[in-house]
């Protein structure tokens, strides 16, 4: 998945306590989804399924692969309580901040202007030597992902944000810096995978870009301050929910888990994770990856056993065998390529473990929506993700309501149209 600029939501419709749809005050006003993945589902898809699932005030929707918070933000806007679970530290941080609407926007803006003034003075006088990240942290970044002078300015600004922090405002100011780093300060670009621009930025107006992001947040907060619908985000592994949720407490699930492909999602958030200090060394990065669903070979570790949960599933085993046969035919011998067949089994085994673990926490009749996509990343072997997950869910006692076509996309390698779908399930009577 890739990252997007702050986006503008469409019209919002929120159910009242009696279930009748009624428009919130933010209708027809901009709502910037402060920091979200572009290839995750758009806000309108969440709203469509909130309505379809009949959710109303007092109900709770769960997003077990929360990402940067599209579901929980839309649920909160629509008066539906929500719980998010996310194992990526940066995505968890972003989604947690995005549902904190208690901040006074005028106070945030005034404080940010003061911080910006302090940062400007230091940047103007401190020209040599340029500030740098610790070597161990810097080594985690993509090469040339940020140029020396923009990095120096960003570290000066980060220091001033932290040294002059007001606790209630700190996380919003840090999230604004994360957004500014990724989209305007750094050399990153996002295609199918995160990469580095050929023409590097030797300089950037770091403080001004950050202030612009703060102003976008403040515009949103002006429209949402009096909205008190509960939303909580847990930093956890979606395959292990026992300590997080109450039995039969979830009315619906709407989520977009990772797809089985060769994208290391931690690379997408690596720059801001390192600069903000959420990841500082290889051990911390490894610990983060171990808490993620095994969707790519960069997250496969010795001792992983989720593949055992689908050892009986003939289609998954056949796909894995075909991938391995294709690898041998093509004489592909890298360590990662040798793991393609296994990570496919680990992915579906991890999803099976998630779906099995989830069952006690669903209310009878709860609906679930999983946004998934077909893949052909492993030697162009087609993986029909939605169909396979439907079969796994059925074996675990879920009713398969249907598989809705959400959109199609063009596969990078094959240039073929691939389906992205919403797998709709129902639990119990």
Image (tube, rainbow, N blue to C red):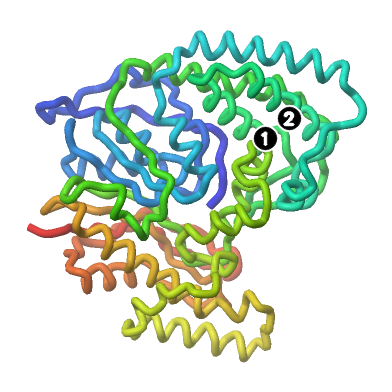
Residue located at (49% from left, 74% from top) = 303
Q: Residue 249: image x %, image y %?
A: 18, 45
Q: Is residue 8 above or below residue 337?
A: above
Q: Circle 2 sits in a helix, a strand or a loop, which is it?
A: helix
Q: Circle 1 sits in a helix, a strand or a loop, which is it?
A: helix
Q: Residues within 10 Å of mark 1 (few under 14, many from 20)?
A: many
Residue at mark 2? 154
* N-terminal label among 2 and 1: 2
Outermost residue toward the left? Answer: 429
| Residue 41 visible to the viewer | no
Q: Is residue 387 above or below residue 247?
A: below
Residue located at (82% from left, 31% from top) = 203
Q: Residues within 10 Å of mark 2 (few under 14, many from 20)?
A: many
Q: Nearer the viewer, residue 373 or 143?
A: 143
Q: Which mark is residue 290?
A: none
In the rendered structure, the answer to whether residue 36 lies left or right of residue 48 reads right
Spatial CA span between label 2 and label 1: 8 Å
In the rendered structure, the answer to whether residue 353 lies left or right of residue 394 reads right
Quadrant of the drawing holding the C terminus: bottom left
In the rendered structure, the answer to whether residue 428 lies left or right of residue 380 reads left
Q: Nearer the viewer, residue 318 or 427?
A: 427
Residue located at (44% from left, 35% from top) = 96
Residue located at (57% from left, 20% from top) = 214
Q: Residue 339: image x %, image y %?
A: 57, 78
Q: Nearer the viewer, residue 7 or 367?
A: 367
In the rendered structure, the answer to whether residue 9 lies left or right of residue 36 reads left
Q: Which mark is residue 181?
A: 1
Q: Residue 353: image x %, image y %?
A: 33, 67
Query: Is there a contact, CB below 8 Å, between mark 2 and mark 1?
Result: yes
Q: Residue 147: image x %, image y %?
A: 81, 39
| Residue 46 visible to the viewer | yes
């Amino acid at each position: 998945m890739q990252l997007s600029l702050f986006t503008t939501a469409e019209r919002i419709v929120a159910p009242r306590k009696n279930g009748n749809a009624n428009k919130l005050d933010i209708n027809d006003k901009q709502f910037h989804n402060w920091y979200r993945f572009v290839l995750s589902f758009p806000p309108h898809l969440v709203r469509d399924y909130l309505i379809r699932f009949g959710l109303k005030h007092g109900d709770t929707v769960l997003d077990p692969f929360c990402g940067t918070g599209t579901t929980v933000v839309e649920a909160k806007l629509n008066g539906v309580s929500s719980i998010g679970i996310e194992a990526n530290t940066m995505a968890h941080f972003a989604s947690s901040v995005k549902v904190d609407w208690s901040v006074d926007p005028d106070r945030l803006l005034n404080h940010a202007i003061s911080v910006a003034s302090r940062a400007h003075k230091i940047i103007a006088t401190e020209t040599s030597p340029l500030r740098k990240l610790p070597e161990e942290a810097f080594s985690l970044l993509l090469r040339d992902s940020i140029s020396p002078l923009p990095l120096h300015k960003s570290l000066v600004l980060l220091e001033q944000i932290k040294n002059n922090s007001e606790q209630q405002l700190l996380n919003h100011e840090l999230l604004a810096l994360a957004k500014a780093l990724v989209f305007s300060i750094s050399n990153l670009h996002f295609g199918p995978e995160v990469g580095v621009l050929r023409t590097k930025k030797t300089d950037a107006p770091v403080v001004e870009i950050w202030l612009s992001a703060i102003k976008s947040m403040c515009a949103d907060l002006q429209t949402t301050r009096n909205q008190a619908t509960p939303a909580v985000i847990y930093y956890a592994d979606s395959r292990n929910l026992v300590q997080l949720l109450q039995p039969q407490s979830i009315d619906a699930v709407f989520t977009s888990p990772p797809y089985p492909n060769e994208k290391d999602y931690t690379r997408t958030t690596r720059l801001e994770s390192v600069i903000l200090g959420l990841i500082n060394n290889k051990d911390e990065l490894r610990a983060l990856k171990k808490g993620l669903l095994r969707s790519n070979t960069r997250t496969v570790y010795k001792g992983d056993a989720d593949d055992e949960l689908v050892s009986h599933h003939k289609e998954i085993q056949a796909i894995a065998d075909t991938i391995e046969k294709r690898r041998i035919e093509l004489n592909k011998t890298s360590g990662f390529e040798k793991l393609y067949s296994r990570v496919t089994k680990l992915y579906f085994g991890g999803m099976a473990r998630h779906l099995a673990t989830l069952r006690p926490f669903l209310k009878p009749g709860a609906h679930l929506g999983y946004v998934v996509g077909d893949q052909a990343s492993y030697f162009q072997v087609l993986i029909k993700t939605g169909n396979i997950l439907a079969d796994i869910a059925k074996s675990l006692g879920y009713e398969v309501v249907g598989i809705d076509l959400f959109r199609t996309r063009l596969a990078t390698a094959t240039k073929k149209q691939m389906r992205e779908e919403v797998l709709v399930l129902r639990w119990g009577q």
